[in-house]
Amino acid sequence: MDTSSHENFPQLNTVEGFYFDTRNTISAYAELETINQVMQRCSYYNDLLSKTVPGSDVWKINHAGGEPVQVSAHTLQILQTAASVSEASQGAFNIAIGQAVGLWRFKDQQPRLPDPQALADAVARADYRKIELDGDLVRVPADMQIDLGGIAKGYIADCIADELRELGVTSALLNFGGNVITIGGKPDGSAWQVGLQTPAGKRGADFWAAVPSRDSTVVTSGMYERGFDIDGVRYHHILDPRTGWPIQNGLLTVTACTKSSLLPDVLTTAIFVLGAEAGMQLAHQFGVQAVLLFKDGKVTYSSGLDIVFVRPKD
Ligand code: AMP
Ligand code: MG
């Protein structure tokens, strides 16, 4: 190993930013100013893709009353990827469930279940095949809403990583709400180690496994991310598009590893909905390696995946 090669690297700097309703970090061997500049670009993507920002592409689509809306190339690419995984997963991934997602008030102080009839009505209208893409125009029926919560962060993480690369950054680790991307390896030539968060453990401190990563992504979806407990039942944010209720299939987290982040972000959500067997098949169909952690502690992962298990602390 050439130990002199990293002497000219700037020190490791970390910048945090709260966007897309989540905490995002960029750690890079780069000047703080460069990292800050790129992190601030998140506002642009937030204002483009958030369904709650009036005037965003998603807001316009959801408020067009069934009329076509002109959108950016970013939004089109996301919608095209969503359509392909929706098709491949037979609707397990379904961005048309916007109304059902909106009925779950995960951020309310007092946890409350949605009205079952309202939920059933919302999913009955949620047909991803009715999202029409025509050039740069998008049309959804007036009684349907889209939600990009399961896909947008992956796309944005890819864009932000590209912007860092364009500014000459060659060594960085980004974490956008569970979408981890690495640029290069570490300056000493070793790979970054991406920890897989222990669901019940301390955020950013307790990991049950680690995946080495170099110019690649490690994306995790988990039922511990967002949700509430009522009478011992965990109601979380990954919904069964057929019912509108959170998926309860024994899975705790799903991690997918590949080159860029958009596809694994979609796939982790889809795999969570499909469950172990069909989920693993979907991952392999898209050439992505996956790790599934079950509530009972069991783990399944793609053969050939480089993963290191961390011994639980005594
Ligand atoms: P993720 O953390 O990437 O798994 O995404 C979860 C988010 O995706 C939720 O907070 C919802 O906004 C959205 N979502 C929930 N269930 C689904 C689903 N079955 N298909 C597509 N998006 C979903
Ligand atoms: Mg996702």
Image (cartoon, grey):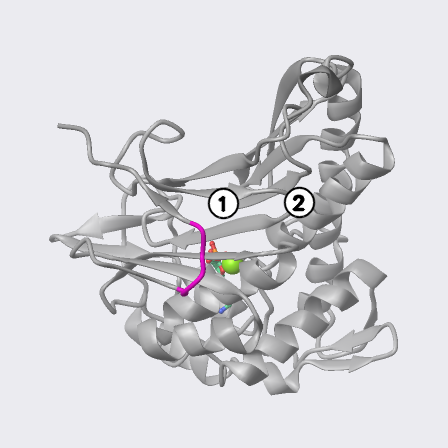
Q: Is mark 2 within 8 Å of ligand 2?
A: no
Q: Which residue is tagged 2?
A: 215
Query: Horizontal and vertical percent for residue 279?
Result: 40, 74
Q: Is mark 1 within 8 Å of ligand 1?
A: yes
The N terminus lies in quadrant: top right
Note whether 184 is above or below 202 in the view shown: below
Q: Residue at x 54, y 78 (%)?
A: 285
User: From where the camera sits, is residue 51 visible?
Assistant: no
Q: Which residue is tagged 1?
A: 178
Note whether 44 is above or below 249 in the view shown: above
Query: Horizontal and vertical percent for residue 17?
Result: 61, 28
What amino acid is labelled 1 in the image? Gly
Kindly report the distance in space between the C-alpha atoms of the residues bearing marks 2 and 1: 16 Å
Q: Residue at x 64, y 34 (%)?
A: 185
- The disc placed on residue 246 is none
Q: Is residue 255 magenta?
A: no
Q: In the image, which residues are magenta?
A: 302-306
